[in-house]
Amino acid sequence: MSRDQILEVDRLTMRFGGIVAVQDLSFAAERKKITALIGPNGAGKTTVFNCITGFYKPSAGAIRLTHDDGKVIALERLNDFRIAKQAKVARTFQNIRLFPGMTALENLMVAQHNALMRASGFTLLGLIGAPVYRDAEKRAIDLATDWLKRVNLLDRADDAAGNFAYGDQRRLEIARAMCTEPALLCLDEPAAGLNARESAALSELLLSIRDELGTSILLIEHDMSVVMEISDHIVVMDHGVKIAEGSPREVRDDPKVIAAYLGTDEEEAAAVMESGS
Amino acid sequence: MKTPSINTAKAASGIPALLKTAGFNALIALVLFSLMVGVRTEAGSDGQLTYWTRFGEVASLVAAVFGGSIVIELLKQWIGPTGAEKLVPPAVQSGMSFLGRYLAPALLIFTLLVPVIFYDQRYILDLAILVLTYVMLGWGLNVVVGLAGLLDLGYVAFYAVGAYSYALLATNFGWSFWICLPLAGVLAAFWGVLLGFPVLRLRGDYLAIVTLAFGEIIRLVIINWQDLTGGPNGVSSIPRPSFFGIPLDNSDNGLAARLGIEYSPTHRIVFLFYLILALALLTNWVTIRLRRLPIGRAWEALREDEVACRALGINTTTTKLTAFATGAMFGGFAGAFFATRQGFISPESFTFQESALVLAIVVLGGMGSQLGVALSALAMIGGFELFRSLEGYRMLVFGMAMVLIMIWRPRGLIGHRAPTVYLTKAHAISSDLVKEGHG
């Protein structure tokens, strides 16, 4: 614990029957920084994500989350919705999971469920229309409006999310995750399926989340232009183990990483690099 | 059989495709009817098997299927189920939306006036009370099925719990209807939670089966727990409701005597009518209100995507339980009303058929739509009475009407969804986007 770490993954192992999807993985994500988790398909990145966000229970290892106030939460002991509610870890999904039959605004209102539930006195105060709840709802709408503005979807606030274009859905999902006011935002391939212009806008959005709001971000990504541009720290996985980590520059020049991506062994990759440079 | 015929109609709408579909349907009819109709078997006088053939009838049935298929295919091409909305001219559409806006208030005003208009027609008043009971049940189940997307095939269990709660509390302890009514709701909600706990992990078909079983269990318990419930004999002489303590009878301190008007048995019917109307409107009001609260939005979000709900920190367990409990509570209220109206209840009133009927009302009306459920309750219960003169063919005509409605409006009469909150303008959300839920 030398630097200010928000997330510390310690010897995480995840087995599915006889298959070891993640083995002895340790890495840390720094506060108010963007950490990227990369690796070829099937490297176990999404499994790590699902362990962190409570969708899987790790077979072994520890995942520690340290809040700004110094409170440490053992994520591997929390499950299901409590990760989002108590540990304040929000996530998006590789295949977008919006509420398609609800409007963009409603999607962002559902994200503020826990705060609004408390304000509505667990429905009783809300049912009789207490002013306390009305104020809370107004604030919730303001927060949602603010986020719709940030992701440039304000004019479509009252349209069904299922009608949105793919790139818009991606941005709306990030906005929805941010409406839970998370300490750590986990993004599973946010740039997948986006064109170059949309990717650039996404990079800008993620940088603004980090710089203006100070939210720590952990992301899985295949789009190297996005990863190299915005990441402060990169962890590379292959076949369930960590093969490298460091700054974008360090990782880019690591022969092990190139070997993993090209599907060759290390010496060959080193040879390719030398001949190239 | 349906899907290929639609595809062929789209791919090639010519006469050969038409004949091919009709021929295929006729072939299936031939296979089915050759055994079901073609060969008639009976036990003879000595118990031996006698049979005779009826090929003439088979031929006419197959011909009817062939001709019917052609007519249906032609109808489909003329006004298709998928392209139906495009064929409706814009003027009619705007007219429909105008109608839609004023339909609910107009219906409400009409309903309020029903006892005035039909004061002398006992039959219509009774039917109206029955329709309103099903409107209320439909609205109650709508919370569970329409909003939360949990398929509940045992809704009648809560109706039964409510009815027996009132019947037993009133006959054993002499408690008044107005004390028992909330108690019946609370007890039904309690059973809702009790049912909810074991089934929360189940989804889709599995949930439906367990709720179906729960409905049967409640009925069987009622039949077999003779000491408490009277078993198959039911509970009789259940007290009639009073006008907040003033009985509605012919006695000296009855309502008629106190008001100084002549007593008429219709007074009680009219009172019952307004009672169930008030209960149904309460259900409607609470549901509309809940939809706009975080709990209601969580129900709908749960129907749309449960995994996303969990990722947003929503406790899906309690959310499902509240949906079950809320729906069950309204079912309990309706049950208490049923008991006081009938004056006699027995397990026969709470069979699976009731659950299926209420579910059909919700599905036909459009899951989640309050107005749709009310309209379909009117159509289902009122319509069923309308076909009474057809006697033996009643079920047939009714079934065909339902099939036709589901072909034309697969997502129910009112399939679109109204947003619960908006910034500038609320647009109705097309039924194509709204999920049905998966348990």
Image (cartoon, rainbow, N blue to C red):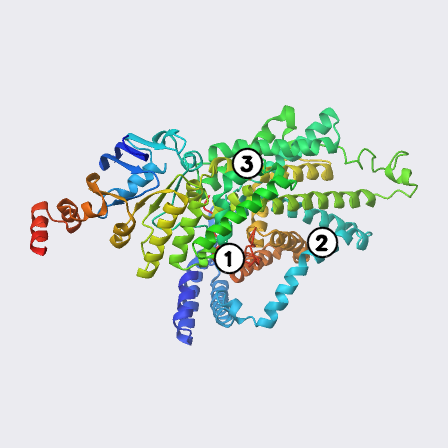
Residue flagged by tag 1: what amino acid is it? Ser
Chain letter for mark 3, please: A
Q: B289 or A92, which is in the foreground?
A: A92
Q: Which residue is mark 2?
A: B108
Name which residue type carries label 2: Leu
Residue in the foreground of this view, choosing between A90 and B215: A90
- Residue A10's place in the image compared with B88, above or below, is above
Q: CA distance from mark 1 to mark 3?
A: 32 Å
Q: What element does badge 1 sit on?
A: loop
Residue name at image x 42 percent, y 65 percent:
B5
Kindly tell me whether residue A16 is visible in this rendering: no
- Pointer 1 chain: B
- For numbered disc 2, what is the local secondary structure? helix
Residue A140: horizontal and vertical position, in percent? Answer: 53, 45
Label number found at residue A118: 3
Q: Label 1 near label 2: C-beta < 8 Å? A: no
Q: Residue at x 50, y 56 (%)?
A: A157
Question: Label 3 sits on what residue type?
Answer: Arg
Alpha carbons under labels 2 and 1: distance apart: 25 Å
Spot occupied by residue A137 in the image (x, y as percentages of width and height) = 57, 45
Check if mark 3's residue and mark 2's residue have beta carbons within 8 Å. no
**Which quarter of the figure is the C terminus of chain A placed in?**
bottom left
In the displayed orientation, state which residue is furthest to the right: B260
Give the residue number, with chain letter if any, for mark 1. B431
Position of A204 compared to B141: left or right?
left
